[in-house]
């Protein structure tokens, strides 16, 4: 496989301030072959990563000139990485549709107008049709989603739109990443709020406190550190690959693994009971996660690599310590970079709790404290890049 020979790639990241976006920006900024990164977000952050400048644009805005604005921002770039996606509000799917579907179509059209050579799109395991839990499916598994949740409907719909886009723009290299659940310690609190809502304090789910973990039929999913996913996104930018790629770590996670992490015992619980309780809480706006999302998780296929990507099964093991850090956060790097006035207030509160010197993250001038999984994560990240790029074919 031939890599790009020229130096100084200019990369645009749409949705650059989220859980995955911040990791992708860092990964690209650390890559010598990348000369500049343009991060596009709805709200400009105070964070200043290497080689990165910021631009404000909301892909879900209904203004007629959003596509033209994006095309101007994309001009002269070597690749566009599209990560922008809304999970909430689940009570108003028209809002998420406007950003997730219509916004994605604007990004695709703008990339074509600007003649961008490569488009890397963040799809998801949620785009897959329901599948088995006892064996992994590869990238050829149907991507019809699950009709009961807006998230999976939108991911599947965008996959169909991208099929047409690829057919109409054969000269553009299109890569679809289909990751499992993505976590990192900086976004642990944010992700708890995203799925469990603000009424669940993090102190209630620290290791050793929850006495039981429900053993639900079908509860088995896959996760990956956001930094490892970002390394794969960077590799997709730098190497002339195209097509769909699954991203997940092994082993998959179910009730036994979660109970081990939480120091809890497993208790079988009827699926209907949990769903009814969740549905009631969701209707009362007590939790943001809809019962449709609950159904989706229980039906997600366990996904792996196709035969030509077999080497990518060597993703790092999701060690117990690593899972703890990702699920509960860590005082080392407690929160994501702030953006906007609301983000600044959250960052201020975060700094007060954790004595963080500024910007919602640890002072880069100070040595970063490490934990037992840190070295293995760095090594696994390097292994992921090598394994992924060696297995990808043009």
Image (tube, rainbow, N blue to C red):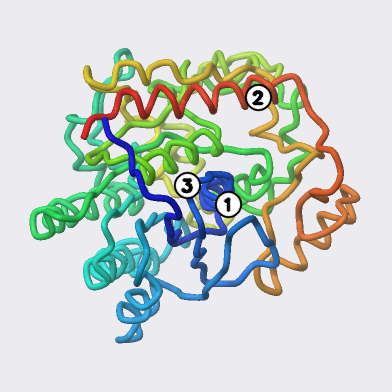
Q: Which of pointers 2 and 1 indicates the residue nearer the eye?
A: 1
Residue 141 image offset from top left, x and y in percent: 19, 30
Please say if 149 is above or below 93: above
Q: Are discs 2 and 3 less than 8 Å apart at CB?
A: no
- In front of the other: label 2 or label 3? 3
Quadrant where the N terminus is found in the figure: top left
Which residue, given by chain and number where applicable, does mark 1 sit on? 22
Horizontally, residue 377 falls left or right of residue 292, namely right
User: x%, y% of residue 60?
Assistant: 38, 72
Judging by the rendered image, the residue that carries numbered circle 3 is 33
Choose the circle earlier in sequence order: 3 or 1. Answer: 1
Q: Is residue 63 visible?
A: yes
Whole-percent x and y of residue 380? Answer: 55, 22
Q: Is mark 1 on a helix, strand or loop?
A: helix
Looking at the image, which is closer to me, 161 or 21? 21
Task: Pick out the residue farthest to the left.
Answer: 167
Residue 317 horizontal/vertical position (percent) = 53, 16
Assign the C terminus to one quadrant of the image. Answer: top left
Q: How far apart are marks 2 and 1 (CA)?
A: 19 Å
Mark 3 or 1, closer to the camera: 3
Pointer 2: what residue?
A: 322
Quick one: label 3, few (<14), some, or many (20+) residues within 10 Å?
Answer: some
Q: Which residue is drawn at 63% across and 55% down?
A: 50
In this rendering, does residue 90 appear at all? no
Give the alpha-carbon distance from disc 2 to disc 3, as whole Å: 30 Å
Dot 2 falls on a residue whose secondary structure is: helix
Classify 10 Å Cα crowding around label 2: few (below 14), some (14-19), many (20 and above).
Answer: many
């Amino acid at each position: 496989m031939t890599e790009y020979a020229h130096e100084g790639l200019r990369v645009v990241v749409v949705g650059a301030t989220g859980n995955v976006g911040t990791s992708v920006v860092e990964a690209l900024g650390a890559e010598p072959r990348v000369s500049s990164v343009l991060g596009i977000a709805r709200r400009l952050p105070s964070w200043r990563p290497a080689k990165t400048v910021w631009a404000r644009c909301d892909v879900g805005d209904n203004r007629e000139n959003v596509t033209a604005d994006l095309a101007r921002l994309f001009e002269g770039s070597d690749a566009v990485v599209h990560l922008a996606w809304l999970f909430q509000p689940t009570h108003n799917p028209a809002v998420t549709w406007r950003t997730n579907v219509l916004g994605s179509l604007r990004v695709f059209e703008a990339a074509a107008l600007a003649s961008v050579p490569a488009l890397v799109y963040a799809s998801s395991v949620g785009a897959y049709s329901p599948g088995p839990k006892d064996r992994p499916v590869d990238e050829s598994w149907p991507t019809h989603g699950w009709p009961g949740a807006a998230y999976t409907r939108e991911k599947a719909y965008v996959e169909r739109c991208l099929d047409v886009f690829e057919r109409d723009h054969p000269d553009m290299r299109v890569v679809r990443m289909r990751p499992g659940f993505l976590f990192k310690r900086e976004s642990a609190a944010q992700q708890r709020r995203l799925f469990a809502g603000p009424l669940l304090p993090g102190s209630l789910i620290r290791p050793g406190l929850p006495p039981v973990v429900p053993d639900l039929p079908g509860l088995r999913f896959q996760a990956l550190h956001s930094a490892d996913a970002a390394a794969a996104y960077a590799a997709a930018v730098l190497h002339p690959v195209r097509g769909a790629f699954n991203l997940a770590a092994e082993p998959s996670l179910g009730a036994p693994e979660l109970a081990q992490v939480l120091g809890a015992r497993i208790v079988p619980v009827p699926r209907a009971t949990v769903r009814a309780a969740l549905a009631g809480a969701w209707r009362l706006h007590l939790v943001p996660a809809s019962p449709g999302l609950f159904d989706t998780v229980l039906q997600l296929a366990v996904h792996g690599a196709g035969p030509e990507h077999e080497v990518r099964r060597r993703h790092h093991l999701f060690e117990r310590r690593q899972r703890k850090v990702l699920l509960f956060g860590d005082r080392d790097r407690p929160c994501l970079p702030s953006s906007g006035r609301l983000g600044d207030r959250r960052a201020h509160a975060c700094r007060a709790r954790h004595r963080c010197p500024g910007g919602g993250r640890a002072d880069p001038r100070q040595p970063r404290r490490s934990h037992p999984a840190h070295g293995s994560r760095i090594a696994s990240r390097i292994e992921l890049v090598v394994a992924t790029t060696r297995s990808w074919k043009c």
